[in-house]
Structure formats: structure tokens, C-alpha cells
Amino acid sequence: MSTIRTILERKGNNFWFVDPETSVLDTVRRLNEKKIGALVVMDGERLAGIFSERDFVRLMAEQGTACLTQPVADVMTSHVYFVKPSTTVDDCMALMSEKQIRHLPVVDGKHVLGVVSNRDVVFEAISHRESLLTGMEVLIANHEFPT
């Protein structure tokens, strides 16, 4: 069964982040610049939170443009769900579905190793299942059934 480690090995473990004092506007600019849907908020080596496109939309609806100068620490999601490298892809998909989230930091101990998106997880799940099906097809094709 595929794990989150498999995804990180394929895509790499580089991830983008901002400091807690980064303004909401600069955080949104970084999301746009990197063409990503969420940024991890790191306080030094510590995972402090996450800020996503959804967070920004909600914030704009509630506060309007006044929020743009606030530090991201004031508006980020501070209760961050995360996965470990050993987490199965299926378990990760279930967590994302249950909590209705699209991005999960990958944490080993106290260290953030990367971030996986729902796209990464679905791609890995499909690839794994296709590989299993191909193996089963080969097994069936090479097996002689008694008549």
C-alpha cells in the first residue's frame, strides 16, 4: 500500500512557507507567485499554522480589504491537521475528505518534511491501483485455468 513517503519521494519535500508576521496581502501574493493553494506558517522550525485560498476567501467575506494588512498569524488556521510519512494514502484521503481540507503538512516528530495536496494524494491512489490492476492482468494472462 502506498504511503505519504512515496508521494514525497516522487514530488520532493520542498515546501513554501511564510513567517507568522507576514501580512495577509504578502501571503496571498506568495500563493499566487508559487501557484499553490496553501502556505505553511512556520515560526522558526515550529509549524504554527496553515493559510489557504479558502481561508482568504472566508476572510475577505468577513472583513473585506481591511484584513490585508493583518499578520497572517492572526487569521491562519492554527489547529493544523497533518500526516506522517508512514500514513497510508487511503488514510490521508479519508482525513482530507472527513475534515474537508485540501492540503496537509507532512510531519515527522517536530519537523515539517513537506506538504501534500489532494491532487498529489489522488494521483498516487490512482497510480497505485493501476499498478495493481496491471499486475493482476499479467497474473491472469499467465495462469492456465483447468477446463
Image (spheres, rainbow, N blue to C red):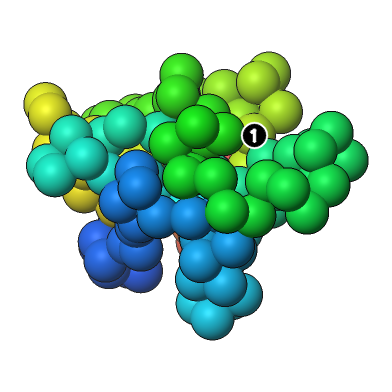
**Is 18 left, or right, of 28 in this rendering?**
left
SS at badge 1: loop
Closer to the camera, 133 or 49?
A: 49
Q: Residues within 10 Å of mark 1 (few under 14, many from 20)?
A: some
Residue 50: horizontal and vertical position, in percent?
A: 46, 39
Which of the two residues, 91 or 58, is positioned nearer the viewer here? 58
Compared to 49, does 6 lie above or below?
below
Q: Quadrant of the N terminus?
A: top left
Residue type at mark 1 is Ile
Q: Which residue is labeled 1 in the image?
A: 101
From the viewer's perspective, tell me whether residue 52 is left or right of residue 13: right
Q: Quadrant of the C terminus?
A: top right
- Residue 41 in the image: x percent, y percent? 36, 44
**Which residue sits at x=68%, y=18%?**
98
Residue 122 drawn above or below residue 27: above
Asked whether 123 or 36 is in front, the reply is 36
Residue at (12% x, 42% y) in the render:
45
Residue in view at x 71 percent, y 28 percent:
100
Does the image show residue 120?
A: no
Q: Nearer the viewer, residue 88 or 119?
A: 119
Q: Position of residue 25 (x, y in %)?
A: 59, 62
